[in-house]
Image: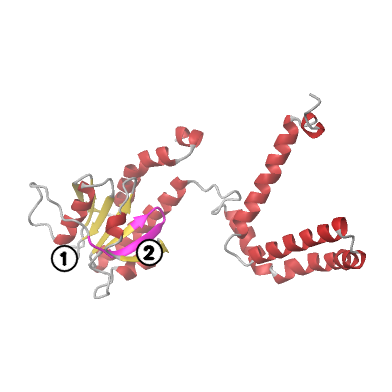
Amino acid sequence: MADVPSILLRLEWTSVVDILLVSIIFYGLFTLVQGTQAVQLLRGVVTIVVITVVATSIFELTAFSWLIRNSLPALLVAIPVVFQPELRRLLERLGRGTGGFLGLRSQETVLRQVIETIARACSQLALARHGALIVLERETGLQDIIETGVRLNAEVSQELLLTLFFPNTALHDGAVIVRRDRVVAAGCVLPLSTANGTDRQLGTRHRAGLGVTEGSDAIAVIVSEETGIISIAHNGRMIRRMDEKRLAKVLTAFYRTEFRVSLPGWLGRLK
């Protein structure tokens, strides 16, 4: 035991928990400030701390250390004032729990919001008789199909879907590919169904929706521009005459198995 550092001998399970809690708090803070101007503030604070430690501990720069020590109170007062909008947004995110303090918002919550958004958008498209074809990617990758369209990588929103499928726009005739909570591409070309039992009265949009589900586990939502009927295709089969609530319910049922698989460890087993 003589070779073991003394700090390891004093390390107890409470010390491990203490370190983990501090690490989790710092990870949560980094997650909250990611993508905001507060990142620059954090970098500046870290830089000042490093310079102060080097100046006082290594080079013993007395005058510089005095300047830093006396400037620190003013910086602590200035930070909340200068970055008030960013701090307010961070606190709002923390209060709502949408981002999760630890960034642990469940995938099920994300997908449920996407499903509700798609259902609302399809309902509006059906009322306006605007044709639409939305493909939700699951385990089977659709990269070859994505490459046939225009890359977007945008957040799924009702306004975006309504705009993409507005008649006479450049991308309204193709399919929109949704991966998790992102619209990956629009104007994509899908393979048509080759099944012998396919109803010949179905239009190209419906046959494309069936076709993509025959070769993958994707889910396709189709809105007919002639009748305004909403249909859903999965595993080479089609369910027609959906309304907003039923569409959301069916999409949730199709995704339920994936929720259990994708959630980590004990979270998935609790579902």
Label 1: which residue? 226
Disc 2 secondary structure class: helix
Residue drawn at (30%, 61%), measured in percent from left and top?
147
Q: Say left or right for 35 vs 15.
A: left
**Pointer 2 and pointer 1: residues touching (CB < 8 Å)?**
no
Residue 142 appears at what percent x and percent y? Answer: 30, 53
- The span from disc 2 to disc 1 (Cα, nearest Å) is 21 Å
Q: Of all residues shown, which one is farthest toward the bottom?
A: 168
Q: Quadrant of the N terminus?
A: top right
- How far across and how far down the image is residue 270, in percent? 47, 33
Q: Nearer the viewer, residue 9 or 257?
A: 9
Question: Element at badge 1?
Answer: loop
Query: Residue drawn at (65%, 54%), measured in percent from left and top?
Result: 29
**Which residue is found at the position 79% from the left and 62% from the top?**
51
Q: Main secondary structure of the magenta part?
A: strand
Figure check: 206 above or below 79 = above
In terms of depth relative to the viewer, which is nearer, 81 or 19?
A: 19
Indicate the quadrant containing the C terminus: top left, top right, bottom left or bottom right.
Answer: top left
The image quarter containing residue 35 is bottom right
Provide residue 155's location: percent of width, then percent of height.
Answer: 43, 62
- Amino acid tagged 1: Glu
Mark 1, Cα crowd under 10 Å, few <14 / some 14-19 / many 20+, is few
Specify whether 142 is left or right of 201.
Answer: right
In-image side of 268 versus 10 (left or right): left
Tell me which amino acid carries mark 2. Gln
Is residue 137 rendered magenta in the image?
Answer: no
Question: What is the magenta range?
Answer: 178-189
Horizontal relation, residue 232 to residue 4: left or right: left
Work out whether mark 2 precedes mark 1 in sequence or the reverse, and give the earlier one.
2
Q: Looking at the picture, tell me which residue is in the foreground, 47 or 129.
A: 47
The residue indicated by pointer 2 is 158
> Does residue 186 show up magenta in the picture?
yes
